[in-house]
Amino acid sequence: MQTANPIRLVVGLGNPGGEYAATRHNIGFMALDALLAALPGSFEKRHGLNSFYWQGRFRGRNLYLQQPQTYMNLSGVAVRQLVNSANIMPEEILVVHDDLDLELGRIRLRRGGSSGGHRGIESMLEELSGGGFNRLRLGIGRDGHTAVPDYVLSPFGVEEQPLLKLVLETATEAAVCALARGVGAAMNEFNGRDLAAELAAKHSV
C-alpha cells in the first residue's frame, strides 16, 4: 500500500564533471542514471535550477528526478530551488547517496535522521529546514589507509565492478518499490540484503 505522501522527487547526489563521474562519492548520480533507464515512459531532461533534472509521469502522477550541479556541499541549494518550483514537500523526496558507514553491497532506506557527516545531506538539512526527507544510502565502505576525502573521490576498483553493478540494479529496484509501494515497504524488502554475499553465492554455484 502506498503512503499518504508518495515520492515525487528522487535526488541523486554527486559532483559534476567528468573527473568525478566514476568516483565513490558519485554513486548517487550513477543510481539516478540507472533508475532513469529503468522507468517506463519518457522523461524530459532540463538544465536549470542549478541542476540537471527530468520530469515525467509514474503511475499517473508527476515525478521529478534530479542531479544537482552545485558540487556536493551545496546540494541542498539546488534541491530547494526545485522543491520550491514544483511545490514538493520534504517527505515526498527520496535522496540517493553514498555512505561510508556501510560496506559496498549494503543499502539502507530510512526516513529522516542526521547527516552522519555527509556534506550533501548536511546541505539539504540546512536548506530544507531540518529535513523530513527519505534516504536511500548506498554503502561504499571505508579504507583505513586512505584519508576520507581522497577515498570518496577515488574510483571503484576493477574487482569491485561486478558488485557495483549489482548494487545499482538493486538500488533501482528499491527506488521503484519506494515509488510504487512506499518507503516502508521498500525498507522491509531491501534493508536486510547482503549483496556481496548474494554475489559470492551465485558465483559458487
Image (spheres, helix red, strand yellow):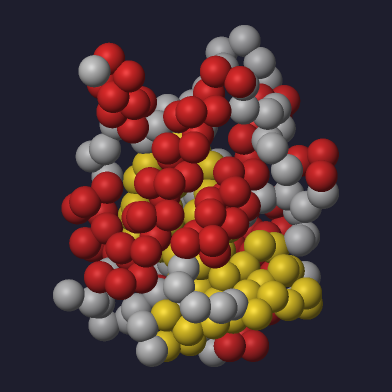
Residue 107 visible in the snapshot: yes
Residue 121, position in %: x, y? 56, 54
Image spot of residue 122 (x, y percent): 59, 54
Q: Position of residue 99 (x, y in %)?
A: 49, 39
Is residue 130 something one can see in this rendering?
no
Rendering quarter of residue 7? bottom left
Side of 181 relative to 27 (left or right): left
In the image shown, does 183 or 43 lie closer to the viewer?
43
**Residue at image point 47% right, 45% down:** 168
- Compared with 134, 92 (above or below) is below
Of 104 and 162, nearer the camera is 162
Residue 96 x, y percent position in the rendering: 50, 54
Q: Residue furthest top?
A: 145
State the residue at coordinates (61%, 85%). Answer: 84
Relative vertical location of residue 13 with respect to residue 42 in this rendering, above or below: above
| Residue occupying the point 42% across, 80% down | 58
Quadrant position of the C terminus in the picture: top left
Q: Residue at x 77, y 70 (%)?
A: 50
Q: How many marks?
A: 0
Is 75 situated left or right of 128 in this image? right
Of the 4 image quadrants, the one containing the N terminus is: bottom left
130 w.r.t. 142: above or below? below
Residue 148 falls left or right of residue 39: right
